[in-house]
Image: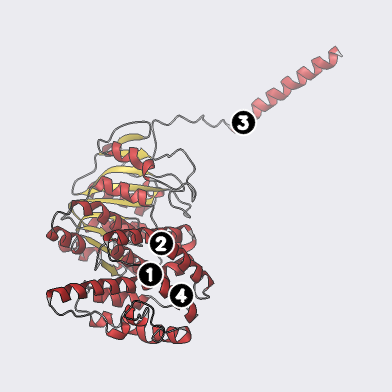
Amino acid sequence: MFEQTFKNLDDIMFQEPGCNTELDYVEQSSWMLFLKYLDDQERNRAVEAQLTGTPYDYLFEKQYRWSEWAAPKLPDGKPDLDRTRIGSDLVEFVNNHLMPYLRSFRQSAPAPDTIEYKIGEIFTEVRNKFQNGYMLRDALSLIDQLNFGTQAQKHELSDLYETRIKNMGNGGRNGGQYYTPRPLIRAMIAVTQPKLGETIYDGAAGSAGFLCEAFDYLRPTVKSTDDLQRLERRTFYGKEQAPLAYVIGLMNLILHGVPAPNLLRTDTLADRMADIEEKDRYNVILANPPFGTNKNKQLQQNFPIKSSESAYMFMQHFIESLKAGGRAAIVIKNTFLSNTDNASVALRKQLLTDCHLHTVLDCPGGTFLGAGVKTVVLFFERGRKSRDIWYYQLSPGRNMGKNNPLNDADLAEFVAMQKTFALGEKSWVVNALTLDPATYDLSVKNPNAPEEAPLRDPAQIIEDMLERDAETAEILATIRGML
């Protein structure tokens, strides 16, 4: 039922003039889903409080609760048509009353780590894009059919939401920045092996895929109420600058089971490296930072190694944000391994001397849909120098693309072999002490790959052609003599 509801919702937004892209679809369904989720939670808690005879304070004033403005009902559960807003009245209420009220929570919230503050942040960034009040009414009615009452329902909804994020990424353009293939994330988590009680951080959170997958990885290890409290409130931390990505990341974490995510709306690169203290460091860092030229020269001054490449600034931030003995898995363009500019060489040297780079996963082209670059994943620990570096060249044996995306089976051998740094046709070891100290080149060069035939010298090619021409002329002359 849930899947059909989402399809019907897409059909409505396809006809809505204010919703033009997959990004709009996700954004608009997100704020409605969020308010419906809060209303379901509120009603459940109110019932529990009533059973125990304790008073319950609602988050929202009565007129702003979902059950009052979005889906008012009669005592028998049927829609209350007399109180149901439609058309321009509905759009006017949402734009001029509901949204401003929700934005005010940012100022009135008791602390940044509360659900009240998250509500204020979300609706500071989100705008209602429905222009047609009748279509908005239809969309609200569909959302109202979804229930968050049981864990199974939450799990199904989180899966559907993940699919929406994936479709947004597959849609190309700027949607691709929000989606890292989940099989790759799961492999990165399997190698870093986070444990309950450790802190996990993503400073380029996007849709929070790394944090959500890490939550799913750790959830089965919960044994007590204290464990659950720690997992939900003191384990996952993230930062995201882009408004839409921030909203999607919050909603994704909430649907996965993190009630008040520690996700901050901020520019990670604005943090000065010199200001990072021990309290700001984490046990595990998982990330796929954005790459490309950052033209803000002021930000570059925050980092010892000056570079306009955003990914290089993020790498420095991640290294400094790791606790001693902390583990990281970071996606980066494969050109980082071999670029000869000063920043690339200096950053490779820092990675090898401040950390133990133990694994390099070479990903095939097409791993990231819509992105025409090749990437690698760097696995490292902070606190000791690099020695043996284990390489694995991922080659699923097919062309990667939208119809042939990366899957868990593709990465199963990598995860299994990485545990013992096993050698094979796709894997090999490079000793860091043998690297050229002038470049610290970490290029992927599989010694087990068959050697390509060397290219011939152009002069030799011409000489061979002339020789063959002479042989051909001699044969033709012989044939003419026989005629």
Q: Mark 3 or mark 2, which is nearer the start of the sequence?
A: 2
Task: Name the colouring of the figure.
Answer: secondary structure
Q: Is 400 in front, or is 136?
A: 136
Q: From mark 1 to mark 4, how far is it between C-alphas?
A: 11 Å
Q: Residue at x 72, y 20 (%)?
A: 471
Graded by Cα atoms within 10 Å as few (under 14), some (14 to 19) or many (20 or more), the crowding at tag 2 reads few
Which amino acid type is marked by label 1?
Gln
Label 2's element? loop
Q: In this figure, which residue is indicated by the disc labeled 1?
A: 145
Label 3's element? helix
Tell me whether the residue at label 2 lies in contact with that at label 4, contact meaning CB atoms closer than 8 angstroms.
no
Image position of 278 with respect to 124: above or below: above
Which amino acid type is marked by label 2?
Met
Q: Mark 1 or mark 3, which is nearer the start of the sequence?
A: 1
Q: Mark 2 or mark 1, which is nearer the start of the sequence?
A: 2
Q: Position of residue 394 (x, y in %)?
A: 39, 40
Q: Is 194 in front, or is 240?
A: 194
Q: Position of residue 280 (x, y in %)?
A: 19, 63
Q: In this figure, which residue is indicated by the disc labeled 2?
A: 1
Quadrant into which the N terminus falls: bottom left
Label annotation for residue 459:
3
Q: From mark 1 to mark 2, how far is it between C-alphas?
A: 9 Å
**Front disc: 3 or 1:** 1
Q: In this figure, which residue is indicated by the disc labeled 4?
A: 138
Graded by Cα atoms within 10 Å as few (under 14), some (14 to 19) or many (20 or more), the crowding at tag 1 reads few
Image position of 424 with respect to 304: above or below: above
**Front disc: 4 or 3:** 4
Q: Mark 3 or mark 4, which is nearer the start of the sequence?
A: 4
Quadrant into which the C terminus falls: top right
Q: From mark 2 to mark 4, how far is it between C-alphas?
A: 16 Å
* Number of marks: 4
